[in-house]
Image (cartoon, helix red, strand yellow):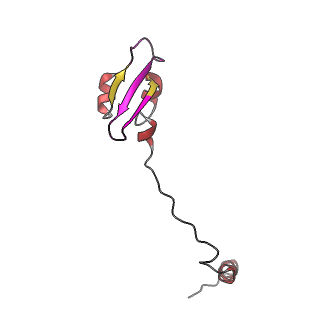
């Protein structure tokens, strides 16, 4: 268990191994978060902890009705439907 935790750049905080469902406290220094997890779940996860599983993605703002007029949108739909290009 300790080798697996070290290989994922985490620190084992607390826990005693009894079986695969034993609970452990694991600390992630990259995200500064602590998690309680079982050995089974930790091994099954690709990166170990939920904070390390996905990068945080900041959503891009959607185009608003004021930035694109309804007539422009209708024109684009009509061109796609009939196979015409705008250029």
Given residues 20 and 61, the one toward you in this image is 61
Asked whether, in this view, residue 9 is left or right of residue 47, the answer is left
Query: Where is residue 35, by image quadrant?
Result: top left
| Residue at the (59%, 86%) spot, across then down | 86
- From the viewer's perspective, is 57 left or right of 7? right
Q: Quadrant of residue 68 in the image?
A: bottom right
User: Where residue 32 appears, x then y in whole percent?
Assistant: 36, 38
Instruction: Say which of 56 and 44 sits in front.
Output: 56
- Return the x and y of residue 28 as percentages of the image width and height: 35, 35
- Residue depicted at 51% across the width and 59% down the height: 59
For this orientation, the residue located farthest to the top is 18
Please state if 48 lies on the left or on the right of 82 as rendered. Answer: left
The answer to which image quadrant residue 12 occupies is: top left
Compared to residue 10, the image places residue 85 above or below, namely below
Instruction: Please tell me whether residue 33 is drawn above or below residue 62 in the rendered image.
Output: above
Q: Which residues are magenta?
A: 15-35
Give coordinates of residue 53: x percent, y percent. 44, 41
Residue 38 within the magenta-colored segment of the rendering: no
Q: Quadrant of the N terminus?
A: top left
Q: Please tell me whether residue 66 is drawn above or below residue 29 in the rendered image.
A: below
Image quadrant in which the C terminus is located: bottom right
The residue positioned 43% from the left and 22% from the top of the image is 39
Q: How many marks?
A: 0
Residue 13 rendering spot, x and y as whole percentages? 35, 24
């Amino acid at each position: 268990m300790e080798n697996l935790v070290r290989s994922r750049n985490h620190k084992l905080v607390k826990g005693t191994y009894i079986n695969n469902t034993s609970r452990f406290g694991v600390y992630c220094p990259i995200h500064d978060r602590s998690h309680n997890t079982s050995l089974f779940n930790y091994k099954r996860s690709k990166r170990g902890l939920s904070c390390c599983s996905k990068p945080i993605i900041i959503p891009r703002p959607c185009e608003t009705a004021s930035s694109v007029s309804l007539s422009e949108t209708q024109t684009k739909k009509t061109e796609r439907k009939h196979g015409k290009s705008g250029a």
